[in-house]
Amino acid sequence: MADTTVAQAGVIKTRRPRGFLLDLLVRLVREKPLGAFGGVIFLALLITGVFADFIAIDKVNEIHPIDRFTPPGSEYWLGTDQLGRDIYSRMVYGARLSLIVAFSATTLSIVISVVLGLTTGFFGGRFDMLVQRFVDAWMSFPDLVILIVAVSVLGPGMWQVIFVLGLLLGIAGSRIIRGAVISVRENVYVQATESIGTPAWRVLLKHILPNVMAPIIVLFTTRLAAVILAESGLSFLGLGIPPPAPSWGGMLSIDGRSYMFQAPWLAVIPGIAITVVVYGINIFGDALRDLLDPRMRGGGMSYKGGGVKRRSAK
Amino acid sequence: MYSYLVRRLIALVPTLLFASMIVFSVVRLVPGDIIDLMLSESDFGADTVETRAELEKALGLDKPIYVQYFEWIGGILFRFDFGNSLWQNTPVIDDIAERMPYTIELGVLSLLIALLVAIPIGIYSAVRQETIGDYAGRTVSILGLAVPSFWIGTMVVILPAIWWGWSPPTEVVPFFEDPVANLQVFIIPSLILGFSLSAVTMRMTRTMMLEVLRQDYVRTAWAKGLTERVVVLRHALKNALIPVVTLIGLLVPFLFGGAVIIEQIFTIPGMGQLLLDSVSTRDYPLITGITLIIGFLIIVLNLVIDLCYAYLDPKVRYG
């Protein structure tokens, strides 16, 4: 019964853009098996995070004081920590935490990138010049340094981390969207629309935005991995999401490094989880990029920008 | 070349200006009062009118914001004065100068390791495209992007200690006093940081090599009957490596960011440690000083690299 409703929902959802999503999926599996494998890892993370309450055995911070430092085994699959908390359950809830941070921060960053990228790429001129110098300045600070300084001011916490990461990656990512907008802008159909007096906002939303969707989707995927890595690094330094929240980076650092000789698994397990998840999302994102946006292949081209081309075209 | 240099130098001015404004405003844009934060979270003294006034004066918060900015930036530009640390009351610039060499050493060693590892593998991967060697190289490089350096670092500290009772040396001595002892401390952290950088470099080298290898002049070189060695190393590599030069510029921020974590794990008293210490004691003059110097260093380094790039690749200059 439940199966049929899920199946029906799937059918209804894929009906309208039929072909596109399905076609993408088929191509992913056929042409990019490694990318499909990454997609499976990503899907597993999603399911773990969404259904954490059913997958985990204990509650997040449930303690078993007698069973402190139990090595991984049949009773506690991944062992317990210094308070006797079940690591398996904490890892599962950690997946949920990673997903919340990753999706919130990435969505924020994409909104910022798209707004900045669309306006600077489309209007160009002095406004673009000024914004680009600001982006230069912004990007000249190492991500981690900005994060550390911002958290020192805002205080540690999940929402602070989301806000700062979103802002950070949003401004940096605007370059990629801007590049794509500039090249789409050169198309004849855009000039044709402009020549019949379509207002700028309409050109932007109806003609440019749909044509830069591919880089946006690719950016979104790769940003998810970047956010997960950055959050865990920040929590590792004790500046991210404070305990007892089950942040993987925090578990690795606070529990893992304090008791590293008594219970090495405390440091080993979160590291493996971060690596597998980031690896999976990265190869999935790479495959998506190759399938959706051949122009972005081999990222090395992006720095040449489109500015030069545009100037000569005018 | 000359006009390109001038254009780049002019573009540098607003960038530096924006960078200083970002650093300056971070501390001032705190929701609520920074003094409240400092008094509530650290023991700067009791919350009295005098301590407040004293702290405001130390931070220069008792003046209008634009006066504060110009005084601050003026002090830096004309007197090289970044203010004094709130705790030790020593000039910030002295603290930074003391720590800087360690971070630079870590950065340079890591970069060297990254390039030494990544460029040969990148070339091999491109020349032998779609072979097992290529797949192995690419898998390792993608892993290098995914494995957090703080995890490898922690493992390198933990595992040998458990297995063999050995842990990496952490007694840091300046390089020029005892190079051997110094390198013993730095080699492992540099290898770890270098590994995570080599992933990006390898991918870039491979992509560029593939692109160059398909060009007409390379085909001509083959047609002339040159050996693979000569075609790859003399003809293709030169052009493929030019964009990799730019990549070094893009890697420098990662170097500084990575150094923060690596220095923490291996207790190297560099800039990263200093930043973390100053954050935990809420020493704002020190925080702004460190951030600004790192930012300016990266901006200037990138300019130098872009100029090298323009020198190497005439297309850029006239583009």
Image (tube, rainbow, N blue to C red):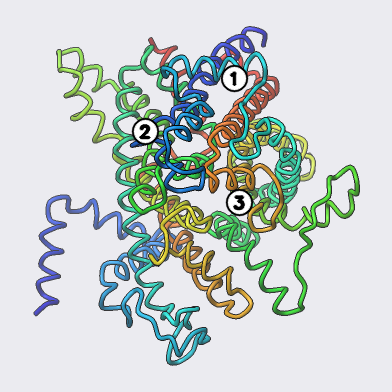
**Circle 2 sits in a helix, a strand or a loop, which is it?**
helix
Residue at mark 2 shares a chain with residue at mark 3: no
Which amino acid is tagged 3?
Ala
Q: Is residue B210 left or right of residue A6?
A: right
Circles 2 and 3, Cβ within 8 Å, touching? The answer is: no
- Classify the position of the C terminus of chain A by image quarter: top left
Residue for point 65% across, 36% down: B248
Name the residue rendered at 57%, 60% in the picture: B139
Q: In the figure, B269 relative to A262: above or below?
A: above
Q: Which residue is mark 2?
A: A177
Residue hosting label 1: B316
The residue positioned 56% from the left and 11% from the top of the image is B10
B193, B264: nearer the viewer: B264
Q: Amino acid at mark 2?
A: Ile
Relative depth, front residue between A5 and A192: A5
Q: Which marked residue is nearer to the observer: mark 3 or mark 1?
A: 3
How far from the left and from the top, in percent, is residue A26? 31, 60
Q: Amino acid at mark 1?
A: Val
